Amino acid sequence: MTGRAQGCTVLHVDMDAFFASVEVRRRPELAGTPVIVGGAGNRGVVTSATYEARRYGVHAAMPTARALRLCPTATVLPGDLALYAEVSRSVMALFRAITPLVEPLSLDEAFLDVAGAGRRLGDAAEIGEYLRARVFDEQGITCSVGVASSKFVAKLASTSAKPDGLRIVRPAEVMDFLHPLPVGALWGVGPKTEEQLLRLGLRTVGDLAHVPAKTLQRALGHASGGHLHELAWGRDPRRVVPDEPEKSAGHEETFGTDVDDPEVIHRELLLLSERTAGRLRSGGWLARTVSIKVRFADFATITRSRTLDVPTDVGQELYDTARSLFDALGLDRARIRLVGVRAERLVEAGSAPQQLELGAREHGRRDAELAADRAARRFGAGAVRPATLLHRVGRPGGSGLTSADPLSRAPRNRGGRPVVRHPEE
DNA sequence: TCTGGGGTCCTGTAACCT
DNA sequence: TCTGAGGTTACAGGACCC
């Protein structure tokens, strides 16, 4: 490939303040004002904020109450994941019209490998500009694009181009681009690791690059240390992979106020198990392992898991295991803030061994749940549910974008980013 | 100022198998 | 039969990402 992006075939496209931008598109009177998308309840956090709100120090994951103290004039919206997913679907379709090598990382970002598209559409930078224009024309929102020879550098490039920009980092420019960045800019360096690196006197990526890999591995562990050292020298051999299989699926919910009643917890575990099982069935997966998560009032969090004899996608079986794991904790009315149920070690439904001895009974339960799935598709989610869930108390609070929304079920990719796939299609 | 919900990956430890 | 080494798997916790 020739031209100004010579040697670059990887694009990272990232929507600017995605959820908030979609909201502003829907309500043009909010353009140019601070807008926050997120939970408004006492335990809600910010999911997305316009750049006008960010100027006040508002950022994602910040408690909404605190965001409002920083920026009292902000408009807080609960969010509409179905709408965001629809926009995302259109944008990803646009990407796939350019190249089949599209790796979605979440609803609002994706890697593209355009090595094969160059002859038709120009070099990677021209393709990036073309995509930015098309996204704006078709969706009325802006995005930023990073162009580089590796995923990791392309991602950092798009971040540095934000908002509404495009940045090219040619192979010969990688070190000049990377080494002045703070260590926290590296993928995989969060607050804890950053603190550790700062204690070692390592402030920039350049500092980190000039420390022997062995030293980093001693400080951060073998895998992380080695990985960061490679990244600091711009080495990232990962390819753009269009379809990664799912590894787990689950749901969790924070109660509006802490709960100490085991009956309420049991009901919540049942609801979360049913939801998780529905996800498994719609995706054609069975789970080999069930895990639960319990977060106490003081935010201390524990997990417990158990591997099943036979993989399942039946809500009642997930629940039986989840409940037994919870009861085994032997909690004496501890105050609990959150519970979660997760299905792990997924296998394709067709490839797993079938339940033999208990066949008749288990099939009956599964058939009932499949019938409930059909009813839900026809009459809406929640049309059929276990009797114990008909009168739920201790309603969960938290984010406005609750997991009750079917579209928050978008499966995720490595690193926990949602992948745009829609089970109800 | 009090921390959502959806994920993946890594590490340490214990148990188990050969 | 006992013991130990080494590999694999399960489990729990933590860090990280969006």
Image (cartoon, coloured by chain):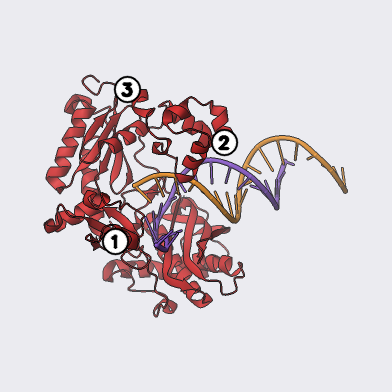
Chain colours: A red, B purple, C orange
* Amino acid at dot 2: Ala
> Disc 3 designates what residue?
A173
**Residue count near mark 2 (Cα–Cα under 10 Å), binned few <14, some 14–19, many ≥20:** some
Lateral position of residue A290 relative to residue A184, left or right: right
> Disc 2 designates what residue?
A219
- Residue at disc 2, secondary structure: helix
* Amino acid at dot 3: Glu
Tell me the distance, in whole angstroms, between the alpha carbons under discs 1 and 3.
41 Å
> Disc 1 designates what residue?
A68
Check contact, mark 2 vs mark 1: CB within 8 A. no
Q: Position of residue A164 (x, y in %)?
A: 20, 40
Q: Earlier in the sequence, mark 1 or mark 3?
A: 1
Q: Position of residue A375 (x, y in %)?
A: 32, 70
Check contact, mark 2 vs mark 3: CB within 8 A. no
- Residue at disc 1, secondary structure: helix
* Amino acid at dot 1: Leu
Lateral position of residue A116 relative to residue A277, left or right: left
Quadrant position of residue A371: bottom left
Q: Which chain letter goes with mark 1?
A: A
Report the residue at 36% width, 37% height from top.
A241
Q: Position of residue A313 (x, y in %)?
A: 46, 61
Compare residues A408 and A167 and report the one nearer the observer: A167
Q: Which chain letter goes with mark 2?
A: A
